[in-house]
Image (cartoon, rainbow, N blue to C red):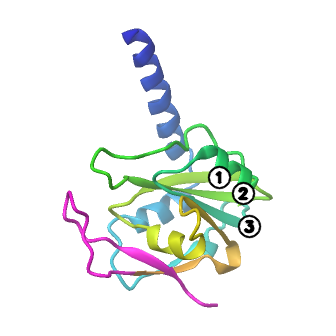
Amino acid sequence: MSNFLLTVFLIVLFTNCSAQADLPSCIKTFKASLKDIEEGKKIEFAKIDCVQWDTVLFVGLAFDREIVETKTGVSLPPEVNYDWMADGEGSKWWILFLKDKKVMARFFINRNDLDFLKLSYALEPTNWSYFMLDRKKAILMTYHTGEYFSVNHEKVIDVKLVEN
């Protein structure tokens, strides 16, 4: 049994690492720019031009794969998995770049760096575990409401849409 668990762990670890390691350079740079981002910063997804894409899909901390796939028409890669930490605050958001509903590139961002939960509630109030933005509308602004994560007491940096 322990060999089986070790094998499963290594497969998950490998696929998560490879998904992040195989990123095109402009997406690696973009992802790095989101780490420890401060409030008042504009995030322009449309500047990502090293892969062809027309939509960005954000998949949240606690999601139902079947619901996301059925409602979006997107087949999620296996490494895009459910993530819920024991502290009850969830740890990451998956960001997937799509072209005609096919995943072209993906990465995750730690929720401690940037949180999409309030925007998700605003765009999908009945199912806040995911949302999609058209490339032309994928311009966000960071802000801080005064909230802090309960466990690590880090500032929550949220995002909102910038009107075009």
| Position in image of residue 14 (x %, y %) | 48, 31
Give the alpha-carbon distance from disc 2 to disc 3, as whole Å.
Answer: 14 Å
| Of residues 41 and 48, the one drawn nearer to the viewer in this rendering | 41
Q: Which residue is the site of mark 3?
A: 54
Q: Residues within 10 Å of mark 3 (few under 14, many from 20)?
A: some
| Of residues 54 and 51, the one drawn nearer to the viewer in this rendering | 54
| Position in image of residue 105 (x %, y %) | 63, 52
| Position in image of residue 124 (x %, y %) | 60, 69
Give the prevailing secondary structure in the magenta stretch.
Answer: loop
At 49% from the left edge and 81% from the top edge, which residue is drawn? 160
Q: Which residue is the site of mark 1?
A: 68
| Position in image of residue 64 (x %, y %) | 57, 47
Task: Indicate whether 127 appears above or below 137.
Answer: above
Question: How many labels, in total?
Answer: 3
Q: Which residue is the site of mark 2?
A: 72
Task: Indicate whether 5 appears above or below 46.
Answer: above
- Quarter of the image where the C terminus is located: bottom right
At 32% from the left edge and 67% from the top edge, which residue is drawn? 36
Tell me the amino acid under the disc marked 1.
Val
Give the alpha-carbon distance from disc 1 to disc 2, as whole Å.
Answer: 6 Å
Tell me the amino acid under the disc marked 3.
Asp
Q: Residues within 10 Å of mark 2 (few under 14, many from 20)?
A: some
Tags 1 and 2 touching, CB below 8 Å: yes
Magenta residues, start to end: 143-164
Q: Can residue 116 be spotted in the picture?
A: no
Q: Give the farthest residue toward the front.
A: 126
Give the alpha-carbon distance from disc 3 to disc 1, as whole Å.
Answer: 18 Å
At 61% from the left edge and 68% from the top edge, which residue is drawn? 48
